[in-house]
């Protein structure tokens, strides 16, 4: 790292204060790009040489060698395509299984892809999302299926034995406490 004397050059004087330094207009040193430029130039030369060698090689190859090279390229393409199809199939099968146990399609695909790629962190995070969604769904279903308790009865409303039997034990007890005479009449009391 350069010191102040080197950075400021002629503008530097011994014993300068911070205020004097702040007032100076100093040009930022320009980075030395010569090394980068040399590397880039050399890279471009090597890339050009490689392209020329490839052209020369193709020109020098016999027709049979050219066909063999083309066949090798085609085989490599087919092998790569086969790998891709196998991975897509495995992911689709895993996703299908996950959907069958309740995952939504996008989360199932995300988890199946992570499973295929061995990304356990993503699988664990997605599993947490799934469990959370399942908890919410179960709670919502429970709330939906919970019956609404009957409205509180008043002594003006005539209670029947059948209506009383449909009540929960707690509701029957409350009715008996609030309406002891009517309760006795329903059960044949005095």
Image (tube, rainbow, N blue to C red):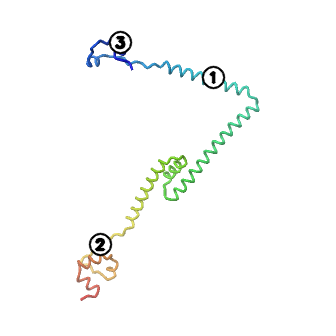
* Residue annotated with mark 3: 9
The quarter in which the N terminus is drawn is: top left
Residue 38 position within the rendered picture, expressed as x and y whole percent measured from the top left: 53, 19
Q: Quadrant of residue 8?
A: top left
Q: Does 89 sit left or right of 160 as displayed?
A: right
Q: Are marks 3 and 1 in contact (CB under 8 Å)?
A: no
Q: Nearer the viewer, mark 2 or mark 1?
A: 1
Q: Earlier in the sequence, mark 3 or mark 1?
A: 3
Given residues 120 and 127, the one toward you in this image is 120
Labelled disc at residue 14: none
State the residue at coordinates (64%, 45%): 82
State the residue at coordinates (42%, 18%): 30
Is label 3 in a helix, a strand or a loop?
A: helix
* Residue annotated with mark 2: 151
Residue 16 position within the rendered picture, expressed as x and y whole percent measured from the top left: 27, 15
Q: Does 57 sit left or right of 185 as displayed?
A: right
Is label 2 in a helix, a strand or a loop?
A: loop
Is label 1 in a helix, a strand or a loop?
A: helix
Badge 3: few (under 14), some or many (20 or more) residues near its Cα, within 10 Å?
few
Vertical comparison of 131 with 169: above or below: above
* Residue annotated with mark 1: 49
Q: Does 110 sit left or right of 10 as displayed?
A: right
Measure the alpha-carbon separation of dots 2 and 1.
Answer: 92 Å
State the residue at coordinates (57%, 54%): 93
Measure the alpha-carbon separation of dots 3 and 1.
Answer: 45 Å
Q: Earlier in the sequence, mark 2 or mark 1?
A: 1
Q: Are marks 2 and 3 in contact (CB under 8 Å)?
A: no
Q: Quadrant of residue 68?
A: top right
Measure the alpha-carbon separation of dots 2 and 3.
Answer: 93 Å
Q: Nearer the viewer, mark 3 or mark 1?
A: 3
Residue 3 position within the rendered picture, expressed as x and y whole percent measured from the top left: 36, 17
């Amino acid at each position: 790292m350069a010191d102040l004397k080197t950075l400021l050059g002629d503008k530097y004087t011994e014993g300068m204060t911070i205020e004097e330094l702040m007032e100076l207009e100093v040009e930022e040193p320009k980075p030395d790009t010569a090394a980068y430029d040399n590397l880039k130039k050399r890279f471009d030369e090597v890339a050009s040489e490689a392209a020329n060698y490839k052209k020369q090689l193709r020109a020098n190859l016999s027709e049979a060698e050219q066909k063999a090279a083309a066949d090798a390229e085609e085989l490599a393409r087919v092998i790569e395509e086969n790998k891709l199809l196998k991975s897509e199939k495995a992911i689709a099968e895993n996703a299908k299984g996950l959907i069958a146990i309740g995952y939504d399609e996008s989360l199932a695909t995300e988890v199946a892809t992570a499973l295929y790629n061995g990304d356990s962190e993503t699988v664990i995070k997605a599993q947490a999302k799934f469990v959370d969604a399942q908890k919410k769904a179960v709670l919502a279903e429970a709330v939906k299926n919970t019956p609404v308790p009957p409205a509180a009865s008043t002594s003006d409303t005539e209670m029947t034995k059948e209506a009383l039997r449909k009540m929960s034990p707690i509701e029957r007890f409350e009715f008996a406490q609030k309406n002891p005479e009517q309760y006795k009449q329903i059960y044949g009391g005095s």
